[in-house]
Image (cartoon, rainbow, N blue to C red):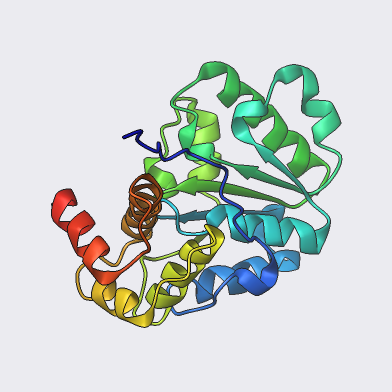
Amino acid sequence: MAEQIGLSLPVQSSEGIDEFYLSDCNKMAVNLLEDWRNWPNFKHTLSGPPASGKTHLGRIWAQQVNACYIDVKSLGLNNIDKIATTALVIDNVSEMSTNENLEGSLFHLHNLLQERELPFLLIGTGSPQFWKISLSDLRSRIEGTRNAKIDELDDTLFPLIMAKLFADRQMYPSPDVFEYLSRRIDRSFLTINSIVTEIDRISIEEKRPITRSLVAKILKKLK
């Protein structure tokens, strides 16, 4: 019998402001971003665990202040002057991996934005002091920037994020599936993302609905 392969189809993740759930783990970060007119030196960093909604929140901020959103890996010295003409969100700063060209471009961009008094938000995974940046002048400027931190999931946000991740994949499990998962998996953004992705894949491959028994089988395999 032919086996159906679970294709990695694009997930239509909803990123509107109504889809960002406010809770104790992210409330302070949201408040700091909302207060952008009072940011020290017109800049801020936003950090948090993997898959915690940093990019989502950054895009919401960009929409609200008419800022442009860019990924740090797209930077080049030849386009810095064109980019530094508006408020900016610069994502994945923690992923430069001591790339000298990227660091030099970001340093130049940072200085131009400061000179032109344009607000900008730098986003990365984990605390900024652990972002892998070899250029000392750039590292000191980022470490000296006030940070907004998203913490790991709390009990309020946990079921909401899990439901959203399923809904993004057009999956709507019964309440007993949610209850079963909530008692057995770590309360981390990355864990929920990984497990929901695996449930989606297995459900497609085996042509099975998402039931408690299927989820139990998947969790046992993942241990």
Name the side, left or right, on which 19 lies relative to 160.
right
* Residue 107 on image: x %, y %: 63, 30
Quarter that holds the N terminus = top left
Q: Is residue 146 visible?
A: no
205 left or right of 183 in image:
right
State the image coordinates of residue 172 (x, y, percent, origin top left).
47, 70
The answer to whether 65 appears left or right of 186 in the picture is right
| Residue occupying the far front of the picture | 1
- Based on the displayed image, in which of its 4 quarters is residue 31 positioned? bottom right
Between 98 and 190, the residue placed more toward the observer is 190
Residue at (54, 56) in percent of width and height: 54
Q: Residue at x 71, y 32 (%)?
A: 109
Image point (39%, 51%), residue name: 197
Picture coordinates of residue 30 (x, y %)?
59, 70
Q: Is residue 23 left or right of residue 176?
A: right
Q: Nearer the viewer, residue 106 or 135?
A: 106
Q: Is residue 96 visible?
A: yes
Q: Which residue is painted at 53% across and 38% down in the image?
A: 93
